[in-house]
Amino acid sequence: MAENILSRDWICRQLGIALLAAIPAGVLVIALLAYTKNPLIALIAPLGFVLALLVVIRPCLGIYAILLSTPLESLASIDFQLMKGLKLSLVGLVTIALLANLWTENKPSRSSARPYSTILALVLVAGCLSTLLSPSPGASLLGLAQIILVCSYYLALSHSSLAGRFAPGFLRSVAVLSSLFAAEAILQSLLGYRGWLGSQEQRFTELGGGMATLWASVERGSATIGSSNAAGLFFCAGMLIALIHAVAQPHARVRYAFMAAVSGLGLMATFSRGALLGLASAGLFALWLGGHRTLRRSIALLLLALGGVALAVPRADMLAAIRIDQRGLTAAGSRFEVWRQARTIIEEHPIVGVGFYNYQKEAEEMQWHPGAPVHPHNGLLKSLSEEGILGALAYLLYIAAFLRTSYSTLRHFPSCGPQHWVFLSIACVGTADFGQELVDAGATFGGSSLAILFVTLLGIQVNLRESLASCQNRSHAAPF
């Protein structure tokens, strides 16, 4: 046994030395190549080297770095795809560090991944089939690699003992980060994207009218996030976490209530209908947890309130405020047009879909409008068009597994003490993400920043759930 442990430790040391030797060499090459195109990247590269070293030593720092990079998608003149590549590289490094920790801890395999393991396997099978039979396998292979990376990250995190220890602090960090970037979105909404308030890509979108609203002096805010819709969903998550924390933790009620208010204003500044739909979904789920009587009363009060608003506010003004005026109707109509377009693609590729990153190409080849979107703005339609029937089935099972796991955890562990607000926060944030995917996609699975954040929350959820179940079993087995 000692020889095995010694051999394992020796292998870990050699692997660590190889990684530490490869990382600076890679960073140096990146810095030299980037200097000719963007000196800012050359300055960031050494910081990335230091971060990589810290992640290898302390994976928990890497998980916080992933969180910090979530809203950093549109900075100065840095390309969005480059930021995404750096983020996925960080996820891969954290996954390796977590798996190395599990190996050195020599712990038996845990069942914390059980709620989602079958679904992840189904997603991978569907992704492999759609990639093999895709019209453009090369592009689809890139998406499949991201799916494999995210699945590996989730499995490593859900089995690691780190997830349970840093869960409350991680959620508090989401609330703090959301309020900070929401403040920037509010300023963008009022002042525009000039100067330090906007990146080059955001100013280009602003010039094209992509940030315009009903009011000429007000624009859609997005902070440093890639789109206003993604920013709205991130602020929605921060608002929900801060609000739940304010209710559950009286000692910090004022501070977190203020954070929730700022994030809520930031959400409104994005003018994202999907984020508002997600927020409503989270509210309904929370009321459902409170019991059917509470849910019925709350829905009745909501309908009365909406009826009063409809009578008091002119219909044209109300529709314009939520971007369903004459200009908004065009946007909404294009959304329905995209769904009809997705239906045509699904009818032509019903079994395995067209593969990842091929939707836009297929749509343009059908001679639809040249500016076809990269996905059909609906989670189920995205799964159907990309991965076919198996992908759609996996998506529906994904939703059912999340709702079942969240509901059963909150019902079966009502006295989980300080961890109760963590479970409730994850349940509400996840419900908001799935609610938003009724009119958008990419928030719950894949290589996007929000999807990686959601998968992190899933890892925390199942890890804490397993820990509570183990503690409960030990308490029942204890002798009197």
Image: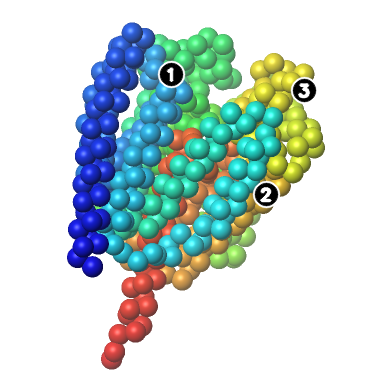
Which mark identifies residue 393?
Answer: none
Residue 381, percent from left and from top: 68, 39
For label 3, the SS is loop
Left or right position of 149 against 259: right
Left or right position of 66 against 220: left
Q: How far is the residue under mark 2 from the one under mark 3?
A: 24 Å
**Which sits earlier in the primary sequence, circle 2 or circle 1?**
1
Residue 403, percent from left and from top: 55, 58
399 up-or-down from 146: above or below: below
Q: Amino acid at mark 3?
A: Met
156 up-or-down from 404: above or below: above
Query: In this orientation, does residue 240 appear?
Result: no
Q: Mark 1 = which residue?
A: 79
Mark 2, Cα crowd under 10 Å, few <14 / some 14-19 / many 20+, is many
Q: Amino acid at mark 2?
A: Leu
Residue 437, percent from left and from top: 60, 41
Tell me if label 2 and label 3 are in contact, CB under 8 Å. Answer: no
The image quadrant that residue 65 belongs to is: top left
Left or right position of 390 against 204: right
* Residue appearing at x 59%, y 65% in the figure: 293
**Which sits earlier in the primary sequence, circle 2 or circle 3?**
3
Q: Mark 2 = which residue?
A: 390
Tell me if label 2 and label 1 are in contact, CB under 8 Å. Answer: no
- Looking at the rendered image, the quarter that the N terminus falls into is bottom left
The image quadrant that residue 353 belongs to is: top right
User: Which of the two residues, 151 or 274, is positioned nearer the viewer here?
Assistant: 151
* Mark 2 or 1, closer to the camera: 2
* Residue appearing at x 52%, y 57% in the figure: 116
For label 1, the SS is loop
18 up-or-down from 333: above or below: below
Q: How far is the residue under mark 2 from the one under mark 1?
A: 34 Å
Q: Mark 3 = which residue?
A: 366
